Image (cartoon, rainbow, N blue to C red):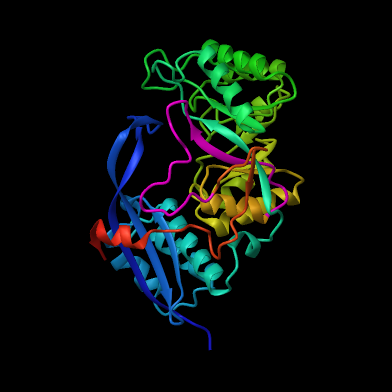
């Protein structure tokens, strides 16, 4: 007899963070601060649990009580497609708000449960395409901090240090609002040119542009990336305009990659393919509705001969990278001269994506998604449980 889900629970707890988010949602270095996280736990009748950690506002008590439990309790924990369909219907009715971030946490926990049940890493359950992957360094946005990322020269110096660390590629996030004077196409070009000059030819570089540039601004920037031989150009314009992205992709040689934030999971991304709005498809576990729809996106891209790069870091995204062959990179970051990415938050026993001197990240061998939670710490710093 198949097991069924018997428990759905969330623990909200205090932990530590060493970065801060500005009013536009961009992350920067910060002092050590107390912050809140939520740990979702789904347990089946065999006593096997799956976990996902995220933001408490996406794992609220009303969502758990009014939606999560009514769908999940008694369901087969391996029936992810059936579960996803039920939540899609509830998402449409809007009886309880269910953003794609929220559904992503549910899907992550179900995959973690499956991996724990079969004593197998999730990346192997997803296809086991590779046991290691090259990583690119994804920078934080520009700032006005001394010794930070306040000038093209700062970006160049940081790029050299990242190359020496072993990274095989670097993706720049340049200056964005609310920083005074941002955005600025000419300053972006100066930063990209300074970094190319610093790391030399043949080293992989990418740019994630300001999300709201006009067509003409994006074209000016894209033509400079052609000259500088960048690997891709990401999110320079509003992603709801497919025609703008096709217009751009048709006029520059640098591959256009997208979408990043467009809702609609794999279904909306199919429109990017058929409308030829990108040269490389993009999805992530968090902004793609979960591992299940993100994997559909990756396979769909493969059917059209496209690579599909995974947005963001962390255990679910690393599992996707390990699961499919038409993914070339793992995004490691966000990185900054004043931030230690390898620092381990107190609610974890280790980070899931250590990098070696060759710039390689190995897939975790632990069952499930590979995260090691310090459950004693979480219990000792518990704020609420529901």
Placement of 142 over or under 73, stated as above or below: above
Q: Position of residue 288 (x, y in %)?
A: 52, 50
Q: Quadrant of the C terminus?
A: bottom left
Q: Which of the 4 image quadrants contains residue 143?
A: top left
Instruction: Please report the residue visible at 46 percent of the width from the left and 75 percent of the height from the top.
Output: 48
The secondary structure that dominates the magenta segment is loop
Q: Which of the 4 image quadrants contains residue 21?
A: top left
Residue that protrudes farthest toward the bottom in the picture: 1
- The reply to whether the magenta stretch includes residue 169 is no
- For the record, the magenta segment spans 324-352
Q: Is residue 166 visible?
A: yes
Q: Is residue 206 visible?
A: no
* Image position of 58 (left or right of 200): left
Residue that protrudes farthest toward the front in the picture: 357
Placement of 138 over or under 301, stated as above or below: above
Q: Position of residue 136 (x, y in %)?
A: 61, 35
């Amino acid at each position: 007899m198949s097991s069924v889900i018997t428990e759905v629970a969330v623990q909200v707890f205090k932990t530590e963070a060493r970065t801060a988010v500005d009013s536009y949602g961009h992350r920067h270095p910060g002092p050590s601060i107390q912050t809140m996280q939520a740990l979702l736990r789904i347990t089946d009748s065999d006593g096997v649990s799956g976990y996902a950690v995220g933001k408490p506002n996406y794992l609220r008590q009303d969502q758990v009580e009014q939606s999560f439990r009514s769908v999940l309790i008694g369901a087969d924990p391996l029936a992810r497609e059936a579960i996803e369909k039920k939540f899609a219907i509830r998402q449409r009715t809007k009886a309880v708000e269910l953003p794609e971030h929220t559904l992503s946490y549910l899907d992550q926990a179900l995959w973690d449960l499956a991996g724990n049940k079969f004593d197998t890493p999730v990346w192997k359950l997803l296809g086991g395409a590779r046991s290691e992957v090259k990583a690119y360094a994804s920078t934080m946005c520009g700032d006005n901090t001394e010794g930070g990322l306040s000038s093209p020269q700062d970006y160049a110096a940081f790029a050299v240090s990242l190359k020496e660390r072993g990274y095989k590629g670097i993706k720049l996030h340049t200056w964005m609002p609310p920083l005074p004077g941002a955005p600025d196409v000419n300053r972006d070009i100066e930063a990209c040119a300074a970094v190319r000059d610093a790391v030399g030819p043949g080293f992989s570089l990418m740019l994630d542009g300001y999300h709201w540039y006009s067509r003409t601004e994006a074209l000016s920037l894209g033509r400079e990336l052609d000259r500088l031989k960048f690997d891709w150009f990401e999110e320079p314009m509003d992603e709801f305009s497919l025609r703008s992205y096709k217009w751009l992709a048709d006029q520059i040689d640098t591959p256009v990659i997208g979408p990043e934030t467009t809702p609609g999971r794999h279904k909306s991304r199919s429109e990017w393919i058929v409308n030829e709005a990108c040269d490389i498809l993009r999805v992530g576990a968090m902004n793609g509705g979960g591992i299940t729809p993100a994997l559909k996106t990756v396979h769909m891209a493969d059917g059209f001969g496209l690579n599909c790069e995974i947005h963001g870091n962390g255990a679910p995204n690393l599992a996707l990278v390990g699961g499919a062959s038409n993914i070339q990179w793992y995004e490691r970051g966000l990185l900054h001269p004043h931030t230690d990415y390898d620092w381990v938050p107190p609610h974890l026993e280790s980070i899931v994506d250590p990098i070696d001197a060759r710039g390689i990240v190995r897939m975790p061998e632990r069952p499930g998604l590979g995260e090691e939670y310090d459950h004693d710490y979480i219990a000792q710093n518990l704020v609420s449980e529901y």
